[in-house]
C-alpha cells in the first residue's frame, strides 16, 4: 500500500468513526488540543498521522488501532 493509499484508508476510517460518534472536526481538534488544520488534513487524506497521534485518536474514540489504520469493509461516509 502506498503512502497515499494509507492516508486515504485512515481518512475514510476517521470520517466514519467521527460520524458515528457525532463529532465534528472542530470538536475533535479542541478536545485533543490539535489544530483544526491538522484534523482536516488527516480526514482529507492529505497528511498521515504518526503512530502516537493514532494512539491518541484510539483513546479518544475508544477504538482499536486497527479500526483506524486498517482497510475497513464497512460503508464509508
Image (cartoon, rainbow, N blue to C red):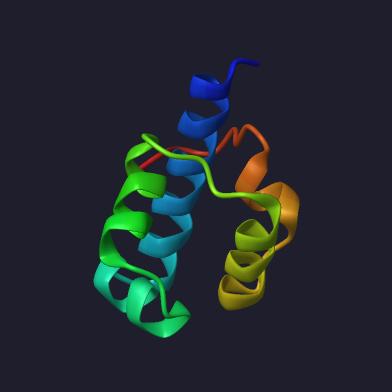
Residue plotted at (53% across, 41% down): 10
Q: Is residue 50 left or right of residue 23?
A: right
Query: Total of numbered circles in the picture?
Result: 0
Q: Give how far across and how far down residue 34 sits, in percent.
A: 40, 71
Residue plotted at (74% across, 60% down): 64
Residue plotted at (57% across, 76% down): 60
Q: Give how far across and how far down residue 4 sits, in percent.
A: 49, 21
Q: Is residue 52 left or right of residue 13?
A: right
User: 12 or 2: which is nearer to us?
Assistant: 2
Q: Give how far across and how far down residue 61 sits, in percent.
A: 57, 72
**Against 58, is 39 above or below?**
above
Residue plotted at (27% across, 57% down): 37
Q: Is residue 65 left or right of residue 16?
A: right
**Against 32, is 38 above or below?**
above
Asked where in the image residue 35 lies, by quadrant, the reply is bottom left
Asked where in the image residue 44 lies, by quadrant, the reply is top left
Quadrant, the C terminus:
top left
Asked where in the image residue 47 lies, by quadrant, the reply is top left
Quadrant, the N terminus:
top right
User: 36 or 44: which is nearer to us?
Assistant: 36
Q: Give how far across and how far down residue 55 sits, in percent.
A: 69, 64
**Against 62, is 5 above or below?**
above
Toward the bottom, the furthest residue is 31
Toward the top, the furthest residue is 2
**Against 20, is 4 above or below?**
above
Amino acid at each position: 500500500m502506498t503512502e497515499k493509499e494509507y492516508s486515504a484508508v485512515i481518512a475514510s476510517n476517521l470520517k466514519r468513526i467521527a460520524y458515528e460518534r457525532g463529532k465534528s472536526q472542530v470538536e475533535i481538534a479542541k478536545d485533543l488540543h490539535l489544530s483544526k488544520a491538522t484534523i482536516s488534513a488527516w480526514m482529507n487524506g492529505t497528511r498521515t498521522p504518526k503512530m502516537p497521534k493514532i494512539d491518541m485518536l484510539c483513546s479518544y474514540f475508544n477504538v482499536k488501532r486497527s479500526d483506524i489504520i486498517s482497510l475497513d469493509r464497512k460503508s464509508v461516509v
